[in-house]
Image (cartoon, helix red, strand yellow):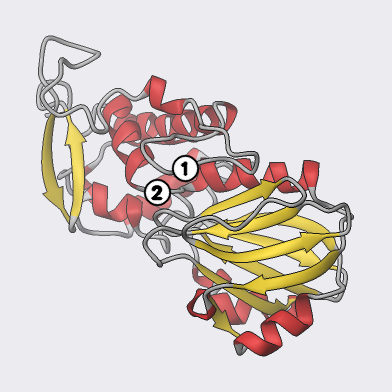
Amino acid sequence: MPELPEVETIKNDVRRYLLGRRIEAVDLLDPALVRRPQPEEFVARLVGTSLASADRVGKYLIIGLGSGDSLVLQLAITGQLLLAKPGAKPVKNDKLVLSLDDGKQVRMNDANGYAKAQLLPKSDLTSSLGLDKLGPDPTAADFTPTVLQSALRRRRGKIKPLLLDQHFLAGLGNIYADEALFRAGIHPAREANTLGPAEQERLYAAIREVLLTGIAKRGTTIATYRDLLGRKGHYQEELKVFRRTGKPCAGCAGVVEMIRMGGRDTHYCPACQK
């Protein structure tokens, strides 16, 4: 599932390879991809405009257009944004094809149908997407230990589901939450407001470490994630607990276990994370 590091990687790829290109044609292969406006209007407003900017807010990929609109993409679980060579034919699960002025194509592919695209005026992004209700970006310079400590004191509930709450932290997902809790030595079922100052400091450092390393490694490929050029990420080589159920712990003589929390698989070492 694309999380903050994966969407950040694709954003950086869009900036490198696509900015300045003009959309010559749009082939919407699955109208269900489009959340708003209506599919016909979505296509009409894309044709002829240029790709002017690329940003990420939480897990949203926001591509600013020369028209003043923003193309907002949510990759959800299996969504991919891929740059194809001129003349390439659509493949299974392609939902949207943007033909560019250099002959190349940008394709949005999604195997399970949860990915979404929206076309919004830039001035409507905050209100339409609820961006003002998202928590802080844990990779931003203004996300400090004090910010996390203050937020933890005000929240009840188990720490793992809280870390996945996008109103608490924007962009953190299942992979990196498990990895951060392991590195911080915190059990995923700990009550958030019981963490002491030293644990809060460790958690802050671990969140930053796993996300920034994830970006440097160009994301985690467990199954379907690819960057804009179709390449796998490399952070899966760094995973200590995620999808390692039954394997030896990387930090002790224990064995990694998996439990379900909030409907999500949660991986941890019961010896390191008591």
Q: Please say whether residue 140 is visible from this viewpoint.
A: no
What amino acid is found at the position of numbered circle 2 in the picture?
Met
Q: Is residue 242 above or below residue 74?
A: above
Q: Earlier in the sequence, mark 2 or mark 1?
A: 2
* Mark identifier at residue 1: 2
What amino acid is found at the position of numbered circle 1 in the picture?
Tyr
Question: Would residue 238 be found to the left or right of residue 103 on screen?
Answer: left
Choose mark 2 or mark 1, whichever is in front: 1
Dots 2 and 1: beta carbons under 8 Å? yes
Question: Would residue 99 be found to the left or right of residue 260 on screen?
Answer: right
* The image quarter in which residue 197 lies: top left
Q: Is residue 241 above or below residue 40?
A: above
* The image quarter in which residue 231 lies: top right
* Mark identifier at residue 38: none
Could you say which is closer to the camera, residue 119 or residue 94?
Answer: 94
How many residues crowd around disc 2 within 10 Å: few (fewer than 14), some, or many (20 or more)? some
Residue at mark 1: 225
Q: Position of residue 152 (x, y in %)?
A: 34, 51
Could you say which is closer to the camera, residue 72 or residue 181?
Answer: 72
Q: Position of residue 150 (x, y in %)?
A: 41, 51
Q: Position of residue 200 (x, y in %)?
A: 35, 37
Q: Residue at x 61, y 75 (%)?
A: 118
Q: Please say whether residue 63 is visible from this viewpoint.
A: yes
Q: Secondary structure at mark 1?
A: loop
Q: Residue at x 43, y 59 (%)?
A: 76
Q: Is residue 140 above or below residue 165?
A: above
Mark 2 vs mark 1, CA separation in Å: 7 Å
Q: Secondary structure at mark 2?
A: loop
Question: Would residue 190 be found to the left or right of residue 125 on screen?
Answer: left
* The image quarter in which residue 199 lies: top left
Q: Residue at x 70, y 42 (%)?
A: 12
